[in-house]
Amino acid sequence: MRLMSFRGTDGVASWGVVDGDAVRDLRARAPSLRDALAQGVSFDTTGTKSLKLADITFLPPITDPDKIICIGLNYLSHILEGGREPPTKPTIFTRWANTQVGHGEPMICPDVSETFDFEGELAVVIGKPCRHVSAVDGARVIAGYSCYNDGSVREWQRHSGQFTPGKNFPGTGGFGPWIVTPDEMGDLPAASLVTRLNGEEVQRAALDDLVFDVPALIAYCSTFTILEPGDVIITGTTGGVGAYRNPPLWMKAGDTVEVEITGIGVLRNPIAQESSVRRP
């Protein structure tokens, strides 16, 4: 099953179940997908309205997560390209919900930077409230998986040892196009992640290259915080980021970036300049 959030032609935010080239609108059952997960509502689409995907605006699958927990330095290839040693514990930083955009919407290159970098990642969405979940039991609290582009403003990321400023400029996180439930995802470690910039492949990895796999991340995060339905764990990026290329390769206005993960699909976002979209 594929679950998504969207804005219809009437301008109203909604959510539903993807059905081929359409989405079945389930807003009557809960105000948002996050609420639906928390309330355990039915995803049965019998008798629901169908809207063409071509006619709606994609929103981030979870528009209002309580927490977005980001994992840094979690692919061996990315650790090695940066000349680092593998961490003994997950490297954690956070992203805010109002920095995200949905599939097809512009990611925003800040006017104060020329170092806007791509980071294709797997996002894990929590489906049940949980605390102190063991790695063995991690799978039982997962609602599903999605694609993420954790766009990074590199010089702001490196102002100190804290990554947060460079990860929270408005419109820098692409999330979507939908959430795929675990029963349809298949063998997660065997899945591949590919990032393309203007059609050229810039990142590729199998998900078994993760230093800390998804169950381990859920166990670690659920120890220091209560994970709530709709919380998002972004699991890290692989090697090939623009910052470590010679010369560096940055995203800029007019570009198109894609993140594709086996079993999920393609998250595609154009890049726009902040000054061209800034509103008073």
Image: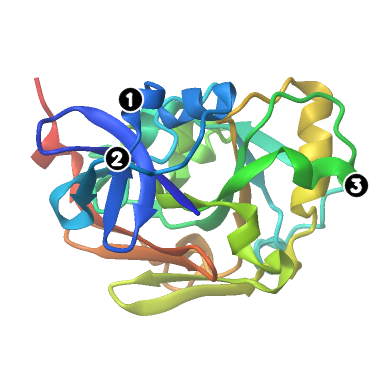
Compare residues 245 and 200 and report the one nearer the observer: 200
Q: Label 1: few (<14), some or many (≥20) within 10 Å?
A: few
Residue 136 tag number: 3
Would you call the spot at circle 3 few (<14 residues within 10 Å), some (14-19), or many (20 or more)? Answer: few
Check disc 2 and report its element: helix, strand or loop: loop
Q: Amino acid at mark 1?
A: Ala
Q: Residue 265's spot in the image, x, y percent?
A: 43, 66
Q: Are dots 2 and 1 in contact, CB under 8 Å?
A: yes
Q: Please, which colouring scheme is shown?
A: rainbow
Pick whichever of labels 3 and 2 is earlier in the sequence: 2
Question: Foreground mark, 1 or 3?
Answer: 1
Quick one: which residue is furthest to the front in this view? 47
- Which residue lies under the disc numbered 1? 28
What is the quadrant of the C terminus in the image? Answer: top left
Say if residue 161 shows up in the picture: no
Quarter holding residue 126: top right
Mark nearest the camera among 3 and 2 is: 2
Instruction: Measure the C-alpha gap from mark 2 to mark 1.
Output: 9 Å
The amino acid type of the residue labelled 3 equals Val
Between the residue at mark 3 and the residue at mark 2, the CA separation in whole angstroms equals 37 Å
Q: Are marks 3 and 2 in contact (CB under 8 Å)?
A: no
Q: Position of residue 228 (x, y in %)?
A: 64, 24
- Judging by the rendered image, the residue that carries numbered circle 2 is 48
Front position in the image: 226 or 200: 226
Q: Amino acid at mark 2?
A: Thr
**Residue at x 79% of width, y 58% of height:** 211
Instruction: Indicate the quadrant where residue 173 lies.
Output: top left
User: Looking at the image, which residue is at 66% across and 46% down?
Assistant: 72
Say which quarter of the image contains residue 197: bottom left
Between discs 2 and 1, the one toward the N terminus: 1
Specify which label sits upstream in the sequence, 1 or 3.
1
